[in-house]
Each structure stands twice: as C-alpha cells, then as structure tokens.
Image (cartoon, grey):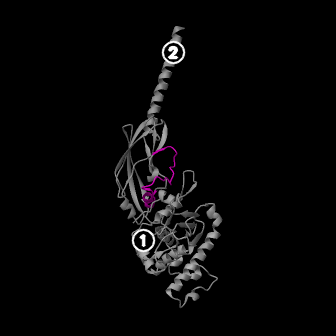
Amino acid sequence: MRRKIFLTKRKKIVAIATIVLLCTVLFFYVTRCSGFGTRFEICDDLGGNIFPSVILSLATTDEQVIQPADSVYVGNPKSCISVKVKSYRPNSKVRIKVAGTPFFEESISEFVLEKAWQVYQVYPDIVWKYDALKGNNQPIPVSISIQVELNGDDIGQRVRTFSVRSINECLLGYRDAGRKFKDTGIFFAAYVNEEHPMIDQLLREALDSRIVNRFMGYQSSDTTYVDKQVYALWYVLQSRKFKYSSVSNSSLSSNVVYSQRVRTLDNSLEFSQINCVDGSVLFASLLKAINIDPILVKTPTHMFVGYYLDKGHKKIDFLETSIVGDVNLEDYFPDQKLDSTIVGKSRGQVSQYTYKKSKEYANLQYHKNYEKLKNREPFYMFLEISKDIRRKIQPIGR
C-alpha cells in the first residue's frame, strides 16, 4: 500500500516537473524565438513611401496629420517610419539604431515600454537632411537598416527598402490599417509659399503696371479696391506668358496612398508652365503675401483659387488660374465664340477680359460642386490658407 502511494506521489512530482520544464521552454521560445518576442518588424504608415513635402511641412509644427496604424505607440510618429516589437516584461528598454542614408543621419533612440506582453509601434528619431529632401525631384529607392536591442539583448538587424518620393508629390490621402480613407489635402498648403524670395519681384512688377499704387490687403473697406489688387497680380502673371501644362500625375502606383504632382513656385516661375494646381498655389502665394486671405478649392479632377473680398470673410470670389496661361477660351466656354472677341484688342483689354471670364468660370465650378465641398466628400477640398493652417502646415520653401 505504501509502495503504491509512493509511486503515485512520484508520478505527480514527475508530472509537475515536466509541466514546469515545458513552461520554461515555452517561455524561452515566446520571449526569445517567436513572433515579436525577440524579433521586430520595420513598418510604416504610407505603403513604403516617404514624402519630402510631408516631412518638411511638419518639421516645425506639432500637428499629427498621419495617424499611427497602432494606437499603442511611443516616439514621434511624424517620420512615418516605425518598428514593431513586443515587450515581454514591464518597463522593457528598447534601443533602436537607424543607419544613415542620403536623406538622414545615423541616429540612436531609446524608449521604455511600460506594459508586459504588449506589441508596441516604436517611432525612432530620424535626423533628416532637409536640403536633400528639398532637392529630390524624382522617386529614389532607399534601403533603411535598423538594429534593435531589447533589455540589453541584440535582437537583430533588418533592412527594408522605401521609395523617397519627389518634392513635387503632394500626399492627397491614404488608407489606414482598417482600409478607411484619410484625407490629407491639407498638404497642398505646403506649396503656398508667401515668403518666397521671388514674391517681392512679382509684387514690384505688379506695382509698375500702375493698376494699383500699393498693396494694402483689407485696409480699405472698399471691396472693389481689394479686387483691383487681385487683378494687378493677374496682370503681372499673364505678362509672363505662362504656358498651360497638364502634367499632374505622379509615378506612384499604390492602393494605400494617393498623390498629386505639384510644381513648386520656383518650378512654375523658372519654366513658365502651370496647370490648374500649380496656378492655384502660385496665385494663393501672392494673395497671402499681400494679406488677402486665399482658398484652395479642389474637386477630384480640378483645382481653382478663391479669395475673400473683406476682412470679415462675408464676400468671396473665385479665379480659374489656368486661364492666366496661353489657353483657348473656347475650351472653357464651348457655347461662346470668345476667341474672336479678343482679336485686335490691347494687352490690357485682353487681360481684363480673361480675368472676368476666369472669375465667371470658377464661380460656376464652385456653385456646381458646393454641396460636395460642404460635406467634405473624398477628394473635395475647401482649404483656407489661414493662420490656423499655418500653425499646422509650413511652406516647404526652396
């Protein structure tokens, strides 16, 4: 009887020892060999793309336009480059080393992951080379190498290739982890550059036309004088003989992110080429420079510029800026024989006529799309370049 009891106890001890051994092996496997226990994954929120216009426009602001894919994160998500790693004990310490590339310096970041058994999305510090980002005018593949230590243990190094997009690509929107579309049309404000060095020269040329004696924004309560200032800007741009260029598509092919090609103010002035987007951001830059509040109005296939005629924003008008270039007016008003009406007229008369027709066309477009703009449907945008926007999005500069 005693022998039988002894054998039973022995079996229990062996069973308990076996369970402890299995748990130890399982713990070792989970924390050292499996999943996110000792490995990590290089992730991003924009389908493997880095947009210089996004990095530059947010560099000095606190705005978080692109939301992290995971709600449990640490670090600064503005870089959009992250590492997913699992902490297997409370207050785990993670050290991330990012190797240098042509677009950023080498950096080392350290974080504390407070919760145990939690997958964290960790955003390391990226020391950007801003001049390199500004100068990138075509998509370039860049291999990013990241090494991670967790609680003092080296858990490996990984490499992932990203596409650094052109400075001329504006991020229109992206789909989050749940495939929900997130509109980022606010980044068009980055291409409105009221502080560009060329602005002063353009304003000087406009004053030399003697259409107005000075630019005073809303200091005059007379809305006709505000409109006269706007026409002076129109006149000087038309004098530069811009050619309409419809190039607007980027080379980006993705079901995660959507982008639009936009010429910077430098590009537009240097090559005297604009499309509806280029003309709108260029004109908005000039309006902002003379303290007239501009608006970028966008539909899925078009953009035009608006402006308030008074400081209280009670009156508004719109311009079809692509007409400032050398265009066929009958493309905009097919039922009217407009080109014949400007034959034999002076440069000033032609400019006034096209300015009037530009406003007519843009106002028609605004009222046609009013409900969709009001409801903020995808790819519809009514973006006031206000002080509030400037606190969120800065011009990308030269």
The span shown in magenta is 49-74
Q: Is residue 153 magenta?
A: no
Residue at figure coordinates x 46%, y 68% from the top left:
289
Residue at position x 43%, y 42% in the image:
39
Amino acid type assigned to the residue bearing label 1 in the image: Ile
Residue 208 versus residue 255: which sits nearer the camera?
A: 208
State the image quarter where residue 199 is shown.
Answer: bottom left
Q: Which residue is mark 2?
A: 9
How many neighbours does mark 1 have within 10 angstroms: few (below 14), some (14-19), or many (20 or more)? Answer: some
Instruction: State whether residue 325 is above or below residue 251.
Output: below
Report which residue position mark 1 lands on: 199
Q: Residue 302: where, in percent of width, then height?
A: 56, 70
Q: Nearest the camera: 123 or 297?
A: 297
Amino acid carrying label 2: it is Lys
Q: Judge whether residue 51 is colored magenta.
A: yes
At mark 2, the secondary structure is helix
Percent across and percent down for residue 330 are: 59, 82
Residue found farthest to the bottom: 344
Which one is nearer the viewer's eye here, 244 or 97? 244
Mark-to-mark CA distance, 2 and 1: 91 Å
Task: Give the farthest residue toward the top.
Answer: 1
